[in-house]
Image (cartoon, grey):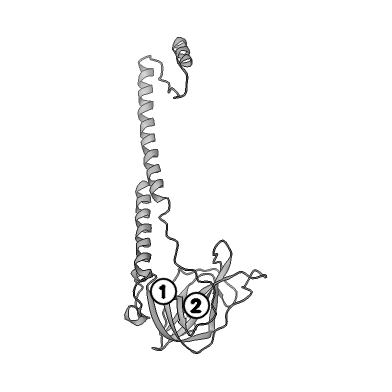
Amino acid sequence: MSQWQFSRQAEVTAANQLVNRNYDAPIVPLETILQPDEPWDRNLEFRPVAISGRYIPSSSLLVRNRPYDGQPGFLQLVAFRTDSGSAIWIERGWYPTGSNQDVPDYVAQLDAREHSLVIRLRHSEAPDTRQAPTGQLQNIDLVKASSTLGSPTYRQAYGRLVDETPAQQRGVDLGKPQLSEGNHLSYAMQWILFALMAIGAVFWNISQDRRRAAGLPPRKLKALNRDKDAEIEDEILQ
């Protein structure tokens, strides 16, 4: 169990290093590092890229169950057709849950003008078999979201909006992830201590059994805070 916690610590550390390395990396054109038909490379996570093209306002979805800063809400996901003809989904920020609890009270409407975007690449999430209301997704399953977009479409990655020209209203920017290594190291040390205590208990019981077999009274563990009189009383009783 301690080895598993050490491996989890190594995974979290590597993920944090990847975010720090990519978050402020130089901006490059999307097509130079990823094509629609290429498999996802995890080293591209949060890598900033540039694209130009037009939003497809009719292909706009809300991703459910996305809490932020302790509040329930949604993410807005909108398809974007690049000048090269490929489509990619753009996450345009977070919206709080509205008064009727099923949709936000307000979601920005987009135009179909030419826009230049800077986005950070994110990996598509695993499929979710749960059903969602029309116009919504249970998670960012790009294969399901892209069923009406045709090809070529990026189904392995989407873009988190960083900047766009000309600018439009958008949801709350989620910003850089808060990086933490968690408690895996302390949990690993606890499992090691538990193992040592278990081994110590085995040898203690073996020692006690040998004393009983030799006709000797078993040893007693003396508490550190017992006074001298209590210790003398125990010796007299023995």
1 or 2: tag closer to the N-terminus: 1
Figure check: 65 above or below 196: below
**Count of marks placed on residues:** 2
Judged from the image, the secondary structure of the residue bearing numbered disc 2 is: helix
Which quadrant holds residue 82? bottom left
Does 67 sit left or right of 220 as displayed?
A: right
Does 22 sit left or right of 94 as displayed?
A: left
Residue contact between numbered discs 1 and 2, judged by CB atoms under 8 Å = no
* Residue type, label 2: Ala
Q: Quick one: label 1, few (<14), some, or many (20+) residues within 10 Å? A: many
* Residue type, label 1: Arg
Residue visible at 50% across and 90% down? 113
Look at the image and tell me whether residue 188 can be seen. yes
Q: Position of residue 51 (x, y in %)?
A: 40, 83
Q: Quick one: label 2, few (<14), some, or many (20+) residues within 10 Å? A: many
Judged from the image, the secondary structure of the residue bearing numbered disc 1 is: strand
Q: Report how far apart the C-alphas of labels 1 and 2 lie in the structure.
A: 19 Å
Q: Position of residue 69 (x, y in %)?
A: 54, 63
Which quadrant holds residue 121? bottom left
Q: Which mark is residue 120?
A: 1
Q: From this viewpoint, which residue is outermost toward the right?
A: 100
Does 112 sit left or right of 201 as displayed?
A: right
Q: Which mark is residue 172?
A: none
Q: Position of residue 197 (x, y in %)?
A: 39, 34
Q: Position of residue 14 (x, y in %)?
A: 34, 60
Q: From this viewpoint, which residue is outermost toward the left?
A: 32
Which residue was labeled with disc 2? 145
| Quarter placement of the C terminus | top left
Q: Nearer the viewer, mark 1 or mark 2?
A: 1
Q: Nearer the viewer, residue 119 or 188?
A: 119
Which quadrant holds residue 181? bottom left
Look at the image and tell me whether residue 155 can be seen. no
